Amino acid sequence: MSDVHVGHLLSDYAFVTISLDISKPQVQHTWTTSSNWRNLSLSEFETDLITSKLCSDLPSLDGTSAAVDKLTALWRSDDVTLGQALSSHEDAP
């Protein structure tokens, strides 16, 4: 820090300027890959989701903690994941 300058006082405030000898860090680039969401068929995805185990018995869910536990168990199971449902439509034309 150098060139400290305190300007005129205004009431109990003052404008202070300083020079800092710091350098800007280098930009780090990160590469990511993602799905081409423009090619996602929403109607097909909706059909797959509605017919999945996750949504197959919604009328039986009564809002109790047991129902929440059931949905949570389904969500965490290996055969019902949103990722799997999405990945089946990932390469759609």
Image (cartoon, rainbow, N blue to C red):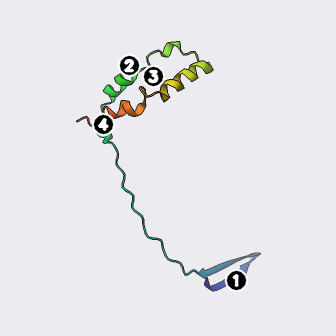
Check residue 51 in the rendering and tell me which mark sits there, or answer none.
Answer: 2
Q: Which mark is residue 8?
A: 1
Please tell me in which quadrant of the rendered image residue 82 appears: top left
Is 35 in front, or is 75? 75
Tag 1: residue type?
A: His
Residue at x-position 34% and y-position 28%: 45
The numbered mark, 3 or 1, whose residue comes first in the sequence reads: 1
Q: Is residue 41 left or right of residue 23?
A: left
Kindly report the distance in space between the C-alpha atoms of the residues bearing marks 4 and 1.
Answer: 64 Å
Q: CA distance from mark 1 to mark 2?
A: 73 Å
> What residue does disc 4 label?
90
Which mark identifies residue 54?
A: 3
Q: Earlier in the sequence, mark 4 or mark 1?
A: 1
Disc 4: CA contacts within 10 A as few (<14), some (14-19) or many (>=20)? some
| Label 3 secondary element | loop
Q: Are marks 3 and 2 in contact (CB under 8 Å)?
A: no
Measure how far apart labels 3 and 1 are at the Cα level.
Answer: 68 Å
SS at mark 4 in the image = loop
Residue found at the very far front of the displayed protein: 78
Q: Nearer the viewer, mark 4 or mark 1?
A: 4
Type of amino acid at the residue the image marks with label 2: Thr
Closer to the camera: disc 1 or disc 2?
Answer: 2
x, y percent for residue 70: 54, 21
Three-letter amino acid code at the position of disc 3: Leu
